[in-house]
Image (tube, rainbow, N blue to C red):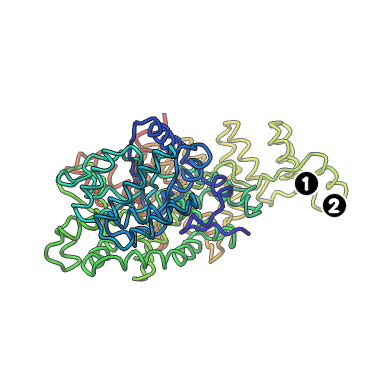
Amino acid sequence: MKMIHKFNPSLISKEDMERIVVGRGMIIDRLKKKIEMGVNGSVTHTIIIGQRGMGKTTILLLLYYKVKEKFKEVIPITFPGGEYSILSLADLFLELLNELYKETKDNKVDEIIKRIKEEGDDSIVDYSLEFLRNFNKKNGKIFLLLIDNIHIIFRQMDEEDLGRLREILMKDNMFIITGSAPFVFDEIVNYDKAFYNFFEIENLKELTLEECKEMIKKVAKINGHKEISENIDNYIPKISAILHLSGGNPRILLMFYEIMSKFGVSEVEEQLKKLLDELTPYYQSRLESLSPQEKKIFDAMALTDCATPTEISKNARIGNVGPPIKKLLDKGYVKISKQKRRKIVLYEISEPLFGIWREMRVYGREEPKFLIKFLEIWFNQGNLGLSFYRLNRYSEEDIRKDMRMSPKDIERHHNNLGNSFYYSKRYEEAEREYGEAIRINPNLAEPHNNLGILLQILKRYEEAEKEYKEAIRLNPNDLQGHVNIINLLITQKRYDGVLDVLNFMLKVEIKEILDKKEFLRIAFFNLLKDLISHKQIYYANVALKMIMAKDEEYGELFMPFSKAINYIKAKMENKPDPDIILDRLHSEVRKIVEEIIKLAEDGQK
């Protein structure tokens, strides 16, 4: 198995990096175009903005490789770890010369470094510039400075050095800077700063589900994990859930892939716990970079909904939270929450998974695991309707062979033969075979169930209902029969009957059988989604209350449905300011609630 280095992409081979990177081709092409323009004398300096783990370092490395291959007039210079050692303009030029020597092995570069490194800062800058200008004139090459975490370097340099650097870049077309930062920082957006409005910004977008799927599939192929690469669709609900919480962060998705490769399709909350364990050193190091006051405010925000500065102040027991919140905002730890109303400003943690880690790992809160389970079910496109029953696929030839070899199970063979005809859309023959199975053994629930499905497809609803009820009578604990009849009743808009069946269904004793518990959760999800999409908000609300009364964990698990129904009801009843229901939700919850609301807005025609 190849190790994919999530925190240090420079350790990944060029070939593997090119194979696994997805969703970044367009930005790399734009950056290459800017370099081509720079070679022709029209220089543009750029900073890539994206949260940690979004692929900024990887893009700079890929750009480095591509420039070495395609642009003979350009020497790409990287600054590995430079953000920790570059405190002045002199440091920047000495580091540039050191990296230039590594790239060219030119002894003259080594000589100038040895000659000037003991000089004063101004002299180092002057001598470096003189040497680089002569190098440029002699070799016809310009310098592409690929500066990761450029915000740290700029903050460590004083205003005088930054001002002089800008003058140099304006005067000398032999330098192109392509940098990266996790957020737009003060030194490039503040009107009073030297680099105000100087850089073009390239914002890294979140990976889409298809891009995440493609990336995980590629990594699985590299590592020989055929179970994942060849059956990637089986993992989509879990990938979607983590994508929703990670904001399409490639680093976190790679960590999740490693967990999937070890533990397979296990319970998503178990995989979340393992992922949070893997992320603990990373998140701890990020928290350690905060001041005690900033850390306390971050903790207060992790444990509450979106909040105003006044509320954060109260929860953190800190008087003036304005300055530390601004610092957290500038550093990318928090963000202004998206709101429909603009009467107040609400803040939330920028990375949902970071907040969940703080809640679960440090404070031991259980609420986030229900959100994870909700997301896995929500993104599971499997439907517990007519495609989810035990309509096993058998060939007619195999079934008739089984009939001859084991005649004692003849009624089951007729049922299976009915299934075979059903899938072939030979409905008359399917009905005959189900009927024969029932004639031989009228106490077998399965052919009644399957005949009901067939009759519902044929819109013979009364007959279908009769068969479903008989299947339930014969096997009251068979949850599929209850789901069947609920689907039929919704089709007929008999919503009172739906509640009656739900009430009976909630009384079914399922004990602790995980498969049945999971089946029940998905069944309830689909029921609520169907009622909401049919604009039956009253019945959806009653059904939700019945479900939540059944089990304490359902209160947390179905919370997004509760919020959505409350919002829809408030809008229908013309209550003042219903948007407050959404504005107080964290973004990862609000997105799902808004999708549920959209079900009602789109509705069933």
Q: Is residue 396 left or right of residue 364?
A: right
The image shows a total of numbered marks equal to: 2
The answer to whether mark 1 and mark 2 are in CB contact below 8 A is: yes
Instruction: Kindly identify the amino acid type of the residue bearing the numbered disc 2.
Output: Ser
Neighbour class for label 2 at 10 Å: few (<14), some, many (≥20)? few
Pick the front one: 581 or 247: 247
Pick the front one: 215 or 554: 215
Residue at disc 2, secondary structure: loop
Residue depicted at x 38% and y 52%: 96
Q: Position of residue 302 (x, y in %)?
A: 29, 62
Pick the front one: 140 or 173: 140
**Where is mark 1, residue-wise?**
413
Q: Residue 283 shows which numbered tag?
A: none
Image position of 442 with respect to 300: above or below = above
**Where is mark 2, residue-wise?**
406
Residue at disc 1, secondary structure: helix
Residue depicted at x 80% and y 44%: 399
Residue depicted at x 31% and y 47%: 129
Compare marks 1 and 2 and give the one earlier in the sequence.
Answer: 2
